[in-house]
Image (tube, rainbow, N blue to C red):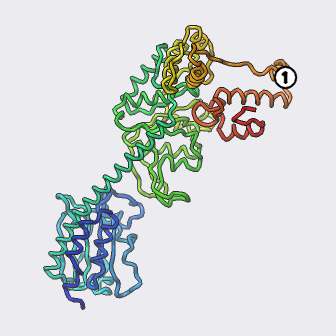
């Protein structure tokens, strides 16, 4: 039988190594491996206090008085003499969880008091597996609470094949105290790293937003229609109610979301935007909820989802009507329960997110035709805000045009051309099917072409004469060739209005209400090259 001094190989070295280890997983493994590597130790195990999870499959679920937290087995090491191949490093056995206050390990965590039985000559009542104790020659047990500033972090349990002497018990107490400090520091370091990573992710996201943002600057205008929208924003912004912003494409729905966030108590936290129409179907869950490394092919690292990224802030779901029907139930669950699970992870995470959704579709009608979940629609439309199209607030056209003119001149580094009353009247008379976004692009193009003179705009150019002549009277039928000519003309006009741009805000696909991939296919079928429009 090994001498008592062999219970620990070099306890001083272990204390020094514990103090230098920052990685939580490596720290836990180091602690039990060093102790468990001794021939005098049958088994060394470490449980940490963590939130209750996996209760459905826990062998001790029936004994658990409170499922909010329990002891989780996080590290195990030892050597079997009865069954040498047995893996004592497994973390999925029947003692993988202990309710606080239940059995010997749970009572140590509950009381914060050590349980030291140097000699198991008379088997205590709390020994569950007497056969295992006999087979492995276990003669002593020491259970030490890991305490830091009066808080129990976990329990270290050591099953010994020798009677545990007083000196060894003293070393165990010292090791447990140092391990608690090291674990607390490691957890604090991990939290700092988590917050730093989150800050970097938020910063990266915001930088991407700045790079692609083609926004309208501010909600500008004095029309009664816009004032009505402003009054609704003032009413609902201070609350946590879900808001559904309704309006045509390009009307400024994202600006409403930004204003709602700016006037809320969440303004100091991020506003995270998700364009639901731009997410491939197979990536919806990952984009919304995140994933862990190895969850699927291509998941090379953990990824935080948009809900988690927006925790404490606001999540803007643009074009929410594009969320696939079979995935809408998962979105509804998050809105109702405030809980998410990353793909490939069983852990449930709580998130505190205010949701603002936007769409240019009639979701009520979509729900009636079972193309959109009715329960999700009612959940999203707690407070609907309808944003009027630009043609219904013509009084704002001149103010917006001047704002976009000054903005474009600064960006292009040119003197701002003069905006005449005649041009303003011309802009006010136009119908603006693309709304504020179209106005911005028209003004920017006019600034580029002005060459130092007054601003001149070109609106609603008629179709080529050859094509117009082929369109028959209303009572006549259209041939397939005539339909193709009309479609080709419409595609060319859309490309011209978007300056040849297909993808993204203000692109031809958005103006036509098509997916970019669909538009590309049609352009190719028509023999239209994006660069030269021919």
Q: Is residue 93 left or right of residue 466?
A: left
Q: Residue at x 38, y 48 (%)?
A: 198
Percent coordinates x, y for residue 76 in the rendering: 33, 73
Q: Residue at x 39, y 43 (%)?
A: 311
Q: Quadrant of the N terminus?
A: bottom left
Percent coordinates x, y for residue 144 in the rendering: 21, 70
Count the marks: 1
Q: Is residue 60 above or below residue 204?
A: below
Q: Is residue 20 above or below residue 484?
A: below
Query: Outermost residue toward the top?
Result: 421
Percent coordinates x, y for residue 439 in the rendering: 57, 21
Q: Quadrant of the C terminus?
A: top right
Q: Is residue 399 above or below residue 218?
A: above
Q: Residue at x 61, y 37 (%)?
A: 503
Percent coordinates x, y for residue 273 in the rendering: 48, 38
Q: Is residue 107 visible?
A: no
Q: Is residue 495 visible?
A: yes
Query: Outermost residue toward the bottom?
Result: 1
Q: Which of 271/108 is in front?
A: 271
Q: Which of 324/280 is in front?
A: 280
Q: Which of 434/288 is in front?
A: 434
Q: Residue at x 27, y 55 (%)?
A: 188
**Disc 1 element:** helix
Q: Is residue 36 left or right of residue 495?
A: left
Could you classify mark 1 by the number of other residues whose Cα lies within 10 Å: few (under 14), some (14-19), or many (20 or more)? some
Q: Which residue is mark 1?
A: 470
């Amino acid at each position: 039988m090994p001498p008592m001094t062999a219970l620990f190989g070099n306890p001083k070295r272990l204390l020094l190594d514990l103090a230098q280890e920052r990685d939580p997983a490596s720290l836990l493994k180091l602690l039990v491996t060093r102790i468990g590597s001794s021939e005098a130790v049958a088994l060394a195990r470490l449980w940490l206090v963590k939130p209750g999870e996996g209760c459905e499959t826990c062998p001790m679920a029936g004994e658990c008085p409170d499922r909010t937290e329990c002891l989780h087995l996080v590290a195990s090491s030892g050597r079997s003499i009865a069954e040498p191949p047995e893996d004592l490093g497994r973390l999925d056995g029947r003692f993988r969880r202990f309710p606080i206050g239940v059995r010997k390990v749970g009572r140590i965590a509950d009381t914060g008091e050590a349980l030291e039985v140097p000699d198991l000559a008379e088997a205590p009542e709390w020994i569950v597996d007497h056969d295992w104790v006999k087979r492995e020659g276990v003669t002593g047990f020491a259970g030490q609470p890991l305490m830091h500033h009066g808080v129990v972090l976990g329990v270290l349990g050591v099953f010994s094949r020798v009677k545990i002497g007083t000196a060894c018990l003293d070393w165990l107490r010292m090791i447990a105290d140092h391990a608690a400090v090291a674990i607390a520091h490691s957890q604090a370091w991990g939290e700092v790293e988590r917050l730093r990573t989150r800050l970097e992710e938020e910063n990266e996201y915001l930088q991407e937003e700045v790079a692609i943002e083609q926004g309208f600057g501010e909600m500008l205008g004095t029309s009664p229609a816009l004032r009505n929208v402003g009054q609704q924003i003032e009413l609902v912004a201070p609350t946590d109610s879900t808001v559904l912003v309704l309006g045509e494409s390009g009307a400024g729905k994202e600006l409403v979301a930004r204003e709602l966030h700016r006037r809320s108590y969440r303004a100091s936290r991020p506003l995270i935007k998700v364009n639901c129409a731009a997410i491939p179907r197979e990536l919806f869950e990952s984009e919304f909820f995140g994933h862990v490394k190895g969850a699927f092919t291509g998941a090379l690292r953990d990824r935080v989802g948009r809900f988690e990224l927006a925790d404490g802030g606001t999540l803007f779901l643009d074009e929410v009507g594009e969320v696939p029907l079979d995935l809408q139930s998962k979105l509804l669950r998050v809105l109702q329960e405030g809980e998410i699970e990353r793909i490939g992870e069983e852990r449930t995470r709580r998130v505190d997110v205010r949701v603002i959704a936007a769409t240019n579709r009639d979701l009520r009608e979509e729900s009636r035709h079972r193309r959109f979940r009715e329960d999700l629609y009612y959940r999203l439309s707690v407070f609907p805000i309808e944003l009027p199209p630009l043609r219904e607030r013509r009084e704002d056209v001149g103010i917006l045009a001047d704002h976009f003119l000054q903005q474009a001149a600064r960006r292009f580094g040119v003197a701002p051309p003069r905006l005449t009353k005649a041009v303003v009247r011309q802009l006010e008379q136009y119908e603006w099917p693309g709304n504020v976004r179209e106005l911005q692009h028209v003004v920017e193009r006019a600034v580029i072409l002005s060459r130092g003179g007054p601003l001149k705009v070109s609106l609603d150019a008629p179709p080529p004469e050859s094509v117009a002549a082929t369109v028959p009277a209303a009572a006549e039928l259209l041939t397939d060739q005539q339909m193709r000519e009309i479609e080709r003309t419409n595609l060319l006009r859309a490309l011209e209005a978007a300056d040849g741009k297909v993808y993204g805000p203000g692109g031809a696909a958005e103006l036509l209400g098509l997916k970019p991939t669909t538009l590309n296919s049609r352009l190719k079928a028509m023999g239209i090259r994006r660069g030269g429009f021919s």
